[in-house]
Amino acid sequence: MTRRLLTALAVLIAISLAAPSIGHAQTFKVEKFDIKADGGTDYVAVEAATGRVFVSRGTHMMVVEGATGKVLGDIPNTPGVHGAGMATKAGHGFTTNGGDQTVAMFDLKTLAVIKQIKVGPGLDGIMYNEPDDKIILTNHSRPIGTLTAIDPKSGDIVATVELEDTAPEGAAADGKGHIFVNNEGKNTIQVIDVKTWRATASWPLAPCEGPTGIAYDKASNRIFSGCNNTSVVVDPNTGKVVATIKNGTRVDALGWDPSKKLIYIPNGGQGNVTVVHQDSPDKYTTVATVDTFAGAKTIAVDPVTHNVYLFQPERGPAPAPPAGGATGGRGRGPQGPIVAAWFIVIKQ
């Protein structure tokens, strides 16, 4: 081997060792805990300050220690509960209770309910907008969906915004006076001005279909919208889709870990999570597909521990349908009994 060739090989090896490992495959550990109890589910939410995870169970909200799966408490009497939002500085948490059209404000330390806030029909999504210090609700109301803003200290409703869709889903704030809302029916993002509490723009998300979960990254100034089959990345300066991400179906949330630059997209239809690395603002590489449990379609990421959480009940065989062929809600037949309640933790 010539000296010139040896020198060239040495240079190539040095370059490969120095190059950052952007987009390389990563491995994750999955732990599953049966946390028992009755009730279906919708959203999970994590309180990063304590590592507690709030798991909706239809008529009550379970509180779980994220790292171990230990049940720490329970908030009863939350009929038709969808999700929870935590305002740690105010010391208050909130649940969206679709069954009685209320939001329960509770003490984060004791879990005792302080106030029942009457909001109206269609309660669904909830998040804490930390930059503007507001609890934000997205409501599947008729004839038009709405966004509601609540003062986390007093529990007072401070604004209601009419949206263009009856099915608004996730919301994310940029800390610059804007809230971005995914509209599942119209496949758009609407922009809300928090000074005027008015919708100021609507951006089409094609090829996204059914946008639900959403996150905003301050460092790259990008919005991530979780969609069925193809999720999208949006530049909020232009409202344009700048990147697409292939994933599975029955996506109902999206997780973002800003320091790890990882997007987590839960695919309930396939029972897995697509994990994507942000290589640059407009470039994204899938680094893993992590098996979870069939039906697990919502997700929460703890930015402190970097743990990722999902939840899904496991049901036994369904009973025979009633005479006459009647079905359950949304055209489904009778559901089987819950035989396990899987609290799922993904760790790096």
Image (tube, rainbow, N blue to C red):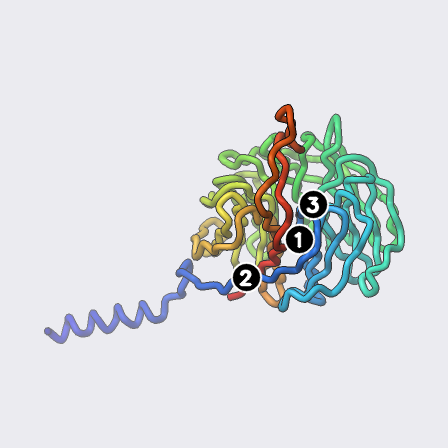
Cα distance, mark 2 to mark 1?
14 Å
Q: Amino acid at mark 3?
A: His
Q: Which residue is mark 2?
A: 346
Amino acid under disc 1: Val
- Which residue is rendered at x = 49% and y = 35% of the image? 207
Q: Which mark is residue 44?
A: 1
Work out whether mark 3 precedes mark 1 in sequence or the reverse, and give the earlier one: 1
Mark 3: few, some, or many residues within 10 Å (few <14, many ≥20)? many
Taking the view exactly as shown, the residue that stands out farthest to the bottom is: 3
Q: Position of residue 217 (x, y in %)?
A: 59, 53
Q: Quadrant of residue 9?
A: bottom left
Residue occupying the point 70% across, 51% down: 38
The answer to whether residue 45 is left or right of residue 133 is left
Residue in the foreground of this view, choosing between 346 and 184: 346
| 162 over 26 or under it: above or below | above
Which residue carries the number 3 mark?
178
Q: Residues within 10 Å of mark 1 (few under 14, many from 20)?
A: many
Residue 117 location, quadrant: top right
> Which is more foreground, mark 3 or mark 1?
1
Instruction: From the viewer's side, name the closer residue of 297 and 76.
Output: 76
Q: CA distance from mark 3 to mark 1?
A: 24 Å
Q: Is residue 123 visible?
A: yes
For the residues labelled 2 and 3, the Cα–Cα distance comes to 31 Å
Q: Point out residue 275 in the picture as x, y percentages from the top left corner.
A: 49, 54
Q: Earlier in the sequence, mark 2 or mark 3?
A: 3
Instruction: Give neighbour class at mark 2: few <14, some 14-19, many 20+ (Cα, 10 Å).
Output: many
